[in-house]
Amino acid sequence: MSRHATAGKAILHSLFELKDGVREKGFRVAFDGYVRHLVEMGYAVEGRLVRRKPLEGFGRRLPDFSYYAAIEFADLKREQACYDFVAHNAEPVRSIHAAMNSQVKRGSAHFFVSYDV
């Protein structure tokens, strides 16, 4: 029995650096607020923010980054709906998203989506 691509979870992954002078705790508050809003709006399931620990001799092909964040969605359909919601740039998500993104070093972020197969 094959599964349709939207039948399983989808995850938006991001690799990034914080701007110089930005405190990790402050970013954490903004990230948690952003994810909480997406969950309350019915788009996301949960989010996770972790710090990278480089391993000597591994990960050389990865871009430079210190932080990894993941936002989980029920499926690709909800992930796309969330993307469209955020891209619409209406309040209050506009301000919530800006409060988080304003702390990320410009040009450092890399994004990709993965989904269950």
Image (spheres, grey):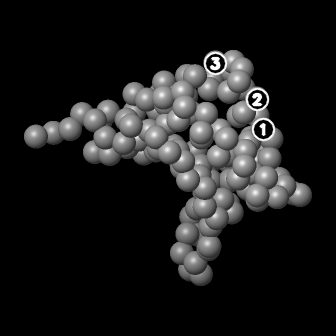
Crowd rating for badge 1 (residues with CA inside 10 Å; few <14, some 14–19, many 20+): some
Question: Which residue occupies 76% across, 48% down?
Answer: 104
Q: Is residue 4 left or right of residue 50?
A: left
In the picture of the structure, the residue carrying the numbered disc 2 is: 95
Could you tell me if residue 113 is visible in this image? no
In the structure shown, which secondary structural element does the residue marked by tag 3 occupy? Answer: loop
Q: Which mark is residue 99?
A: 1
**Farthest residue toward the left?**
1
Are circles 3 and 1 on residues that touch, CB within 8 Å?
A: no
**What amino acid is found at the position of numbered circle 1 in the picture?**
Ala
**What amino acid is found at the position of numbered circle 3 in the picture?**
His
Horizontal and vertical percent for residue 40? 54, 31
**Disc 1/disc 2 C-alpha distance (Å):** 6 Å
**Disc 2/disc 3 C-alpha distance (Å):** 12 Å
Q: Is residue 52 above or below residue 94?
A: below
Q: Nearer the viewer, residue 71 or 40?
A: 40
Could you tell me if residue 30 is visible in this image? yes
Badge 3 or badge 1: first in the primary sequence: 3
Horizontal and vertical percent for residue 38? 57, 33
In the picture of the structure, the residue carrying the numbered disc 3 is: 88
Question: Which residue occupies 24% across, 33% down?
Answer: 4
Q: Nearer the viewer, residue 97 or 15?
A: 97
In the structure shown, which secondary structural element does the residue marked by tag 2 occupy? Answer: helix
**What amino acid is found at the position of numbered circle 2 in the picture?**
Ser
Are circles 2 and 3 on residues that touch, CB within 8 Å?
A: no
